[in-house]
Each structure stands twice: as structure tokens, then as C-alpha cells.
Image (cartoon, rainbow, N blue to C red):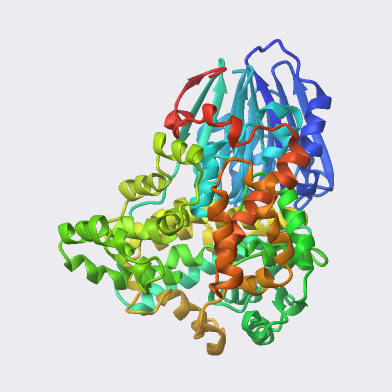
């Protein structure tokens, strides 16, 4: 696990200075505290911060081929590299390390950009081809590892984090109102947008080639067709699922350093720990956290699972300094991120890093096997589609606007009146729901929304593109392409790497994902039973029933309590002139939200948390870490552009 960064120029005679690459690498030292490496030549500079996991003494990057015409820096792990190495050696390639990185070099010699099709793992890769004067960037299929890029003044900048780009090109810090609208809507900024107009995320399963001053981005992988696999029996389905989950877990145990697992006591993490225990010769190290408030403490379920599989269990019951942690995280996040479970993810990563360098997690099970409550709720609400569409449309336009804001069931009635896919998007969206009650956006911000692409359209496009017929499979596809990437995997990557910890995700092994996608919805949501076949597998491998058949919590935390106590004083920053004058929101609406939360007894902690993170990101990252003069909405409106899909096609340098 590492952090990568670099520059390629349109002027092939231009020299990239090593010191520039060092500055880019220094900005992400937390991703790789063990080592640093560089390669600079006319037209290119590559950098790497290394967290040494495999071939510790010999796997220093950048790594090159035999005649030093191909150079690679790489963040991630390739789990099938031993097989690839043997195959490449049989074809005459000579290796000088025992690392997984070197197989990428020789695969590129054989297959060019097609090398990524052979890789099984998580990765963000940069390959410099000296002969063709071409830079190749690639991101893994599901988006476990991040990769950002910007074409700026004739140079292509790239990095695992935007910090690297901003460290050497601070004028890239132009606030992107479109990206911020996406954040306010979903709590994260979906690919390929970022919080900055000139910086893009390379989407999962995509390649970028930079040659001759032009960028070309193309997709090399997507989730295959859903509902194409039909096991003859439940036993047959379970046997195949068990084989695939075990293999996906086993190959992720390759490491030259200690490894362990996050353990919440839920279905996903418990199943992964069960498989680790089966594959390991010694006790598995497991890590759990809990909070002192019993309603948010599921540590006893984790303890139960740890006892069952005889793990070396480490547990931390927290009374955290929430204010200090929020200050730290909003200083490190390059764009606002509204998932409050980043706090427990940070804490459990911190705990694990005291004992191991690598941890396995159970992320991905919900998107693959329909684990979120919203899938069941959405399925239940399909009954309202029996009401004719013209009646529902009439209700939204003629009746709903006249209902008192505080009337019970008002939000529910609007949601169920929508077409089924719009209903799902509406249920995930913070801003439209809030705006129907309390118009929050300023006139200037609202103008940007009116001129550009509605945030919900990004999800609509995935509905249109989904390789699925039934509604549940379409929801799973949309979440896999958006929420999983932009929220779940982003959270895990950022919080773990802040602690210099590598996290591996067996349930998102791409071969397992392809097979799971093919299973019909019947195996995933059966009646009101979510993750049906995965729960059956967990039972089969010995996970205690008490841990399986309980209310899903995930990384729950007492946010409402904190908002009324520990974070109450911090929350007051939303009403300071400095915040209200940024130009995003109507001051009266912010005051009303605060008053309703503090005085009426309504729990608006989720809404206020999102606004708090938004403001603290401006203060703690944008102003402190980038530039105190970075433009905000008041002078950025004129720069706002509708979402532009052209970033995914060829574009001449400088555009």
C-alpha cells in the first residue's frame, strides 16, 4: 500500500524537477511512511510513498523493465502476482525483485494498457512508456484505491490524493460549485467530480492515457449482467459462495508483515474473520471499538464472534474527544465528506495500526447482497405504483405545496408519489428534501443548480446504464457505482491511510462480484430477509446466530447526543458571520435549522452534521492547508460549469 504522485508534460524536452516530485510525495507521507522513491526524466516525473508490505527490502519503487524503458509506480496489492510472475518468466522476462509491482511492468510490455485485465486486486497505477512517450493511469475495477488528475498549463498532474496536486499547483484550488452541490445532496462528491473545477477523479474500472498532449479516458471493466446465474438448489449456491469467499479471503492473506481484521460482529466482517481463521495457521488478530452509550455499543457481538473463532481480540470502548477528531479529519479531507461513520472507522484503524500493518474488512457485502434497509423499504413502497402516475403527479404539483410543513407523513407522501427510480434517488438525497421544507440555498447557489446538471441526474444515468432488468438489481448497480465508491470505499481508504494502515476487502474481489451480480434477486432479498444467502453462509461457517439475527448497526455512533453536548459549541460556527457570508446558504434558513434542532426537540443532527463538515472543510483544509485566498462561492459563480462528460473523452492539452 502506498501513495503515488507525478507529472507528465506536453513538452517532451521539458525537465520535471525531482524536488517538485518530492513535494508532491511529502503531502501524502501518511500513505507511505516507510520509504520514498522517484523517477525523473525529460517529460515525466514519478513519485511514490511506500508502506512496505511485500518484498520489504527489494520492492522499492519506481520499478522498471530490463532496459529501463518502462517505469511504474503503484498503490495497492496484486493478489495473483505469483501466477502472473511464473507466466511472464516462462515468456522470457527477467525479474529483479520479488514484489507484486514488477509483474505490472512486464505485463505492460506484453499487453500495453490491456495489462490491467490480468490484474486481480486493488490498484492505482501509473506507467511511463519512454519509447512511446506515453503515461498510462489505471484504477481498479471497484474503486478501492483513489486516483486524481488535472491537466494544467500543459502538464498532467496525478496523485492518490489531491493534496499532492495542490502542493505544487495551488492555483488548482478553484472551488467547484457543482461538486459542492453534489456533496450537499449525497454527502459525498461522486466521480469524476471533485471539490475543485480543474481536478478530476479517475472513475473505477477506467484507464487514462496521456500522449501527444491529449488525454483519453476509457472504461475497461463494468459489473456484468445481473440475474444470469441460476443455482439448482440452495446447497449448490452456498457451496459456490463459500468457495469463492474463502478464496477471495485466502489470497488477501499474502503479506510479509502482520495482518488482522476489523470485526463489528455483523454478518460481513464475521464471515471474513471465519474464513481467515480457516485459512490461517495461527490466531487471527481482530479489532473492534464501541462507545460507552449502550445504544451504540455492539462490541459484545464482536466479542462473541472473536470467542467463537479463537481470535486474538483487541477492543477499545471509547469516550472520544469528538471535537479534536472532527478538527483533525476536516483538516485532512480534501473535499467535504458527510458520512459520520468516518469517526469510528478512523478510531478502529488507529487501534489496528498499533498491532498490524494490514487489516481485512467486510465492506461491500451490502451492495453485493442487498444488505441496506433501504432496499427492503423501497421494495415495500412499490405498492404505491398502483396509483396512476397522473394522480401522483397531480398530488405533487397541486396538493403537496399546500400541506403544512409539520404535518405527519408529508415527506413520505411526496416520496411515494414519485416514479420508482426517482423515489430511490429522493430517499438518498439530502438537499431536495430539505429545500421542500426550508429553502436553504442562496440565490446565487440556486442559479448554479438551475443552469447546470441536477445532482440526481448522475444516479439516473446509472439507472439507464445498469445491466439489470429487475428493480433490486438496478438499485444494487447504482449503489455499486456511486455510494460504494464515493462514500464507503473513500471513507475506508482515507481513514485507514491517515493511520498508515492497509485495508483489504475480500467481498469486493472482482471475480466474486461478477458471480454475485449474476445471482437473481431471490438469493439476496427474500421477503423481508436481507442478504439472505450471505447470512446462510455465515451460519454455515459457524458465526453465532445471536450476532446474525439482530438489528443491523454497522459503525453506529451517538451523533444526536454529540450534537446536543460535545459538539454543541462547535456547531455554533454555522451562525458566525464568516460562515454565513460565504454565499452558499440563506442565513435565515441556517438559523431556523439550528433553532428547530435545539429548541423544538426535532432531531436534525444529520442535516446539521453535513453543514458543519462543509464549513469546517472550508476553514480547516481550504484556508489552512491550501490557500487563504482560495475563491468561494461569492467569486466562483462565474466559473461554474455544468457537469461535463468530455472529461471522459479525448481532450487537447490546456482545455
In the rendered image, residue 381, in percent from the top left (x then y), is placed at 29, 70
In the rendered image, residue 375, in percent from the top left (x then y), is placed at 38, 68
Residue 563 visible in image? yes
Left or right side of 534 for 228: left
Residue 229 visible in image? no
The residue shown at (63%, 75%) is: 264
Placement of 573 over or under 403, stated as above or below: above
The residue shown at (56%, 15%) is: 212
In the rendered image, residue 100, in percent from the top left (x then y), is placed at 68, 46
Q: How many marks?
A: 0
In the rendered image, residue 640, in percent from the top left (x then y), is placed at 51, 31
Indicate the quadrant where residue 611 lies: bottom right
Placement of 243 over or under 437, stated as above or below: below
Placement of 53 over or under 547, stated as above or below: above
Left or right side of 451 for 385: left
The residue shown at (55%, 67%) is: 596
- Name the residue at the front extreme: 588
In depth, the one of 380 and 361 nearer the eye is: 380
Left or right side of 323 for 402: left
In depth, the one of 283 and 4 nearer the eye is: 4
- Name the residue at the top extreme: 13
The residue shown at (23%, 61%) is: 395
Amino acid at each position: 500500500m502506498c501513495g503515488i504522485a507525478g507529472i507528465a508534460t506536453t513538452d517532451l524536452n521539458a525537465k520535471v524537477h525531482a524536488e517538485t516530485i518530492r513535494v508532491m510525495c511529502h503531502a501524502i507521507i501518511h500513505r507511505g511512511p516507510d520509504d520514498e522513491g522517484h523517477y525523473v526524466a525529460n517529460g515525466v516525473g514519478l513519485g511514490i510513498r511506500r508502506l512496505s508490505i511485500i518484498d520489504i527490502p527489494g520492492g522499492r519503487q519506481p520499478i522498471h523493465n530490463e532496459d529501463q524503458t518502462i517505469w511504474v509506480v503503484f498503490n495497492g496489492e496484486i493478489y495473483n502476482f505469483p501466477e502472473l510472475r511464473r507466466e511472464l518468466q516462462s515468456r522470457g522476462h527477467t525479474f529483479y525483485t520479488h514484489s507484486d509491482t514488477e509483474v505490472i511492468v512486464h505485463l505492460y510490455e506484453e499487453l500495453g494498457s490491456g495489462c490491467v485485465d490480468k490484474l486481480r486486486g486493488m490498484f492505482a497505477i501509473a506507467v511511463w512508456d519512454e519509447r512511446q512517450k506515453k503515461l498510462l493511469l489505471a484504477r481498479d475495477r471497484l474503486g478501492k484505491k483513489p486516483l486524481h488528475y488535472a491537466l494544467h498549463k500543459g502538464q498532467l498532474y496525478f496523485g492518490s490524493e489531491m493534496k499532492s496536486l495542490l502542493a505544487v499547483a495551488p492555483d488548482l484550488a478553484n472551488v467547484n460549485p457543482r461538486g459542492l452541490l453534489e456533496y450537499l445532496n449525497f454527502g459525498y462528491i461522486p466521480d469524476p467530480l471533485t471539490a475543485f473545477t480543474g481536478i478530476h477523479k479517475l472513475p473505477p474500472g477506467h484507464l487514462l492515457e496521456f500522449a501527444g498532449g491529449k488525454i483519453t479516458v476509457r472504461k475497461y471493466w463494468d459489473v456484468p449482467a445481473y440475474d444470469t446465474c441460476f443455482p439448482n438448489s440452495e446447497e449448490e449456491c452456498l457451496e459456490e459462495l463459500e468457495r469463492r469467499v474463502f478464496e477471495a479471503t485466502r489470497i488477501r492473506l499474502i503479506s510479509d508483515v502482520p495482518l488482522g481484521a476489523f470485526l463489528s460482529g455483523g454478518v460481513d466482517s464475521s464471515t471474513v474473520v471465519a474464513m481467515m481463521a480457516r485459512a490461517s495457521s495461527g490466531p487471527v488478530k481482530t479489532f473492534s471499538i464501541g462507545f460507552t452509550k449502550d445504544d451504540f455499543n455492539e462490541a459484545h457481538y464482536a466479542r462473541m464472534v472473536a470467542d467463537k473463532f479463537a481470535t486474538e481480540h483487541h477492543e477499545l470502548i471509547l469516550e472520544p474527544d469528538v471535537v479534536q477528531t472532527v478538527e483533525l479529519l476536516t483538516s485532512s479531507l480534501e473535499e467535504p465528506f458527510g458520512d459520520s461513520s468516518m469517526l469510528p472507522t478512523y478510531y478502529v484503524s488507529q487501534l489496528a495500526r498499533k498491532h498490524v500493518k494490514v487489516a481485512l474488512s467486510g465492506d461491500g457485502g451490502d451492495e453485493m447482497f442487498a444488505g441496506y434497509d433501504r432496499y427492503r423499504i423501497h421494495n415495500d413502497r412499490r405498492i404505491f405504483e398502483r396509483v396512476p402516475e397522473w394522480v401522483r403527479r397531480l398530488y405533487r404539483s397541486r396538493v403537496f405545496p399546500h400541506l403544512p410543513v409539520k404535518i405527519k407523513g408529508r415527506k413520505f407522501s411526496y416520496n411515494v408519489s414519485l416514479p420508482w427510480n426517482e423515489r430511490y434517488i429522493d430517499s438518498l438525497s439530502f438537499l431536495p428534501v430539505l429545500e421542500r421544507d426550508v429553502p436553504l440555498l442562496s440565490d446565487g447557489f440556486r442559479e448554479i443548480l438551475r443552469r447546470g446538471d441536477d445532482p440526481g441526474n448522475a444516479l439516473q444515468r446509472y439507472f439507464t446504464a445498469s445491466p439489470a432488468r429487475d428493480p433490486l438489481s438496478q438499485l444494487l448497480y447504482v449503489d455499486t457505482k456511486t455510494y460504494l465508491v464515493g462514500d464507503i470505499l473513500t471513507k475506508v481508504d482515507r481513514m485507514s491511510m491517515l493511520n498508515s494502515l492497509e485495508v483489504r476487502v475480500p467481498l469486493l474481489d472482482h471475480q466474486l462480484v461478477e458471480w454475485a451480480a449474476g445471482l437473481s434477486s431471490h438469493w439476496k432479498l427474500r421477503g423481508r430477509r436481507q442478504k439472505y444467502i450471505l447470512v446462510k453462509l455465515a451460519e454455515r461457517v459457524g458465526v453465532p446466530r445471536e450476532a446474525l439475527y439482530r438489528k443491523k448497526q454497522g459503525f453506529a455512533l451517538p451523533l444526536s447526543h454529540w450534537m446536543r453536548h460535545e459538539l454543541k459549541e462547535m456547531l455554533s460556527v454555522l451562525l458566525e458571520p464568516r460562515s454565513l457570508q460565504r454565499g452558499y446558504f440563506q442565513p435565515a434558513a441556517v438559523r431556523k435549522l439550528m433553532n428547530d434542532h435545539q429548541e423544538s426537540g426535532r432531531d436534525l443532527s444529520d442535516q446539521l452534521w453535513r453543514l458543519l463538515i462543509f464549513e469546517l472543510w472550508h476553514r480547516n483544509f481550504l484556508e489552512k492547508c491550501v490557500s487563504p485566498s482560495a475563491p468561494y462561492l461569492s467569486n466562483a459563480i462565474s466559473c461554474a460549469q455544468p457537469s461535463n462528460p468530455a472529461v471522459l473523452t479525448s481532450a487537447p492539452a490546456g482545455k
